[in-house]
Amino acid sequence: MNDKPKMLLSERACLLLCVALGALQAWLLRYAMSSDGVSYLDIADAYFRGDWKSAINAYWSPLYSWCLGLALYLVKPSIWWEFITVNTVNFLIYVGALFCFRFLLHCVVRSLRENVAIASSDSVPLSESALQMLGYSLFLWCSLILIEVGKVAPDLLAAGLVFLIAGCLVELSNRHSYAKFALFGALAGVAYLARSIMFPLGFGLLAILLFSGKRSKTRVLGVLLSAAAFLIVCSPFILALSKTKGRFTFGDTGKLAYAEFVSPRPPGVHWQGKPAGSGTPMHPTRKLLDDPPVFEFGEPISGTYPPCDDPSYWNEGMRWRFRLRDQLHVLVAGALTYERLLLLREPGLLAGVLVLLFVGGKDTRKAIATGWPLLAVAGLSLAAYLLVLVLDRYIGTSMVLLFLAVFAGIRLPKNSWSEATSTYLSAAIALAVVLTVGGHLIENTYATTFTVGTDPPAKDQAKAALGLENLGLRPGDKVAVIGPGSFNLWARLGRFKIVAEAAAADANASEFWTFPTERRDLAYAILSRTGAKAVIAWEPPLTALDSRWNRVSSTNYYVYFFP
């Protein structure tokens, strides 16, 4: 590889393009929020007001909440600006992840330079310009399509940390450095604070580190140093969490997810002990009425919507169960998700990779096998999620590592024809990915310009919060909702607490309005006894409303204040 190759695009241009497209998506999704995001914000508030009982949470990891909490503490945004502030933090995390990826890419390029300098082969790797184009296009695909800047979740934060870990792994494959061994372990520990799954995966990363270079006394000592740094970073939160729960735990997310999505598949919200074999609830939400279903959950968990703020509390006693049939069903579903991701959503990338693999032949297969550590890091995460639940945002980082390892292993014949062909083919692959990203941004634009789907528009959440304030609700007031409470983001903005809901969390809110008037009136009477000052509904059928209901501002929310 030449130190100064002819580049179709300079790295600076690639970085500027990534920042510009990331900023565009952040702007388009500036009002975006999710029920997960509300929980992270509630926990962030708890940390910064010193409410450790509410802050130490066995379901939601702390690092992302710390980032959001710091921003809200410094900015103190108004109702209209809170979600914009959150998505600005997401954009800053995106930029940080971009430069973490740059570190990884430089480590890969440096490793290729060194290996090519000592190799005596008739084949050469892709040029640095080709790797740059492919690498940054992979980053765009991962961060703007699979994860998205507007997803209020720690996935981009975890992605940046994994890129740093992978970069250190590449560096430590070629040379020993006790400082980098310690950094590797510390980064793995910080990654656990971003996503709890990184604790068990952290031990897998240490095993990959151990076998990724020549075994020697120095390497063994370095890996032990990495393990010590990993445990030192993880231990304070694990100890605090275990003390809070009264049992050892590094987090309950994994076991609850396995029970809900694999076996025995109880509901994630309002679990009352069914199906049989799912365990015995220790403190479930309280079911007050069957038809229509009414649940109350005002105490003891604080936050906007307690069932989502601490699922590990409400689902204490839930048990997962291994059943081969259920596990095989989930494995097949996950494999089909991977297939759709590659064949239907990014066929240009897959087709280009197959062409390069075919042209590269035996030397390419051997080089890819030599670079197995990056493949192993990618496979570790892909296999873990395949066992439980595959979502785009969970696997985006692994897809980047997988394809980057393949591209770094491409070996082509030493002639001007193959070099030119690989450069133009790489440019075509990168262009195909960037066009896919552009199409996704157009979808974002359409979705924010027009009402898409059945959920309330993002701006209506702020209008509803202000409208309810104008009608008499104050921060801290308790309210009830018709339908799943997790979708009522206005409650977070107004600092209201949802303490009850009519309709189970997995039911359509419209089902409530199919009950006879007397059953709905009975539900209202029960909701009024939960301490709620009012009940709020989104897009109720106007024929089912009476004079007790008032429209909230110019939104399609309606409120009924209890006498």
Image (cartoon, helix red, strand yellow):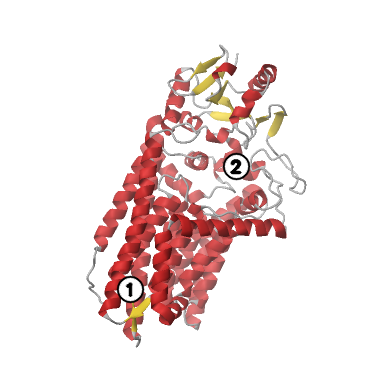
Within 10 Å of disc 2 (Cα), the crowding (few <14, some 14-19, many 20+) is many
Left or right position of 442 against 206: left
For image coordinates 46% across by 39% down, the residue present is: 33
For image coordinates 41% across by 68% down, the residue present is: 353
Residue 126 is tagged as 1
For image coordinates 64% across by 32% down, the residue present is: 297
Residue nearest the observer in this picture, 231 or 296: 296
Residue 522 is tagged as none
- Please identify the quarter of the rendering in which residue 117 is found: bottom left
Residue type pointed to by label 2: Asp
Residue nearest the observer in this picture, 187 or 447: 447
Q: Which residue is mark 2?
A: 310
Task: Give the CA separation, mark 2 to mark 1.
Answer: 49 Å
Left or right position of 444 against 335: left
Residue nearest the observer in this picture, 370 or 420: 420
For image coordinates 45% across by 36% down, the residue present is: 452
Vertical order, 530 against 192 (above or below) = above
- Most extreme residue toward the top is 547
From this viewpoint, is residue 530 visible?
no
Residue 193 x/y as whole percent: 51, 54
Q: Which numbered mark, 2 or 1, is in the foreground of this view?
A: 1
